[in-house]
Image: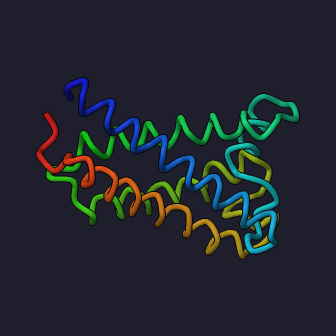
Amino acid sequence: MDTTRILKASGVGLVTAAIIAVLMLLAIKQGISPLPEPLGLAFAEAILGTTLPKPVGFLFHAAWVILWTLVYVRLSPGIRLSHALYLGAALWASALVIFMPIAGWGFLGLAVTPKLIVAAIVPHVLFALFIWSGCRLLGMTGTAR
């Protein structure tokens, strides 16, 4: 990928991460989301073994979203919505079977509540929609080089 494409994709990933983080924080604060805290923060705390401020969790979240946005742009010929949705589904599954257990929430988040299975779909669908629309908005519809 050329530098311009990398910078555009990174920007799309960063904006996507910020929007989703704000929405999830609001949903948690309002009691709409069953997540006890942002998953990125819980994961970071689990692997570092200490309590961390929310911005550290956001940095983990943002790095993850930017990484997968770059992968999407590199591997999705023509920036297709279907590819973004497949990626979002794969990341949702990884959240349930890898990240939630590491964070101490159990397999599929069942140690917290079965509602996490469905609740985790929302940010991953938003991720797919935001990276797809952001890339299209920035004219990144050509095949990745």
What sort of colour scheme is used for the picture?
Answer: rainbow
- Horizontal and vertical percent position of residue 39: 70, 51
Instruction: Say left or right for 102 vs 68.
Output: right
Left or right? Give the position of 100 relative to 65: right
Q: Position of residue 85 (x, y in %)?
A: 36, 64
In the image, taking residue 127 as reference, residue 102 lies left or right, namely right
Q: Residue 127: x, y in percent?
A: 46, 57
Q: Quadrant of residue 40?
A: top right
Residue that protrudes farthest toward the right in the picture = 51
Locate the N terminus by quadrant. top left
Residue 26 against residue 113 in the figure, above or below: above
Residue at horizontal 82%, vertical 36%?
53
Instruction: Please state, as top left, top right, bottom left or bottom right, where the C terminus lies in the image.
Output: top left
Vertical placement of residue 18 versus 10, above or below: below
Q: Residue at x 79, y 71 (%)?
A: 113
Q: Position of residue 32 (x, y in %)?
A: 75, 74
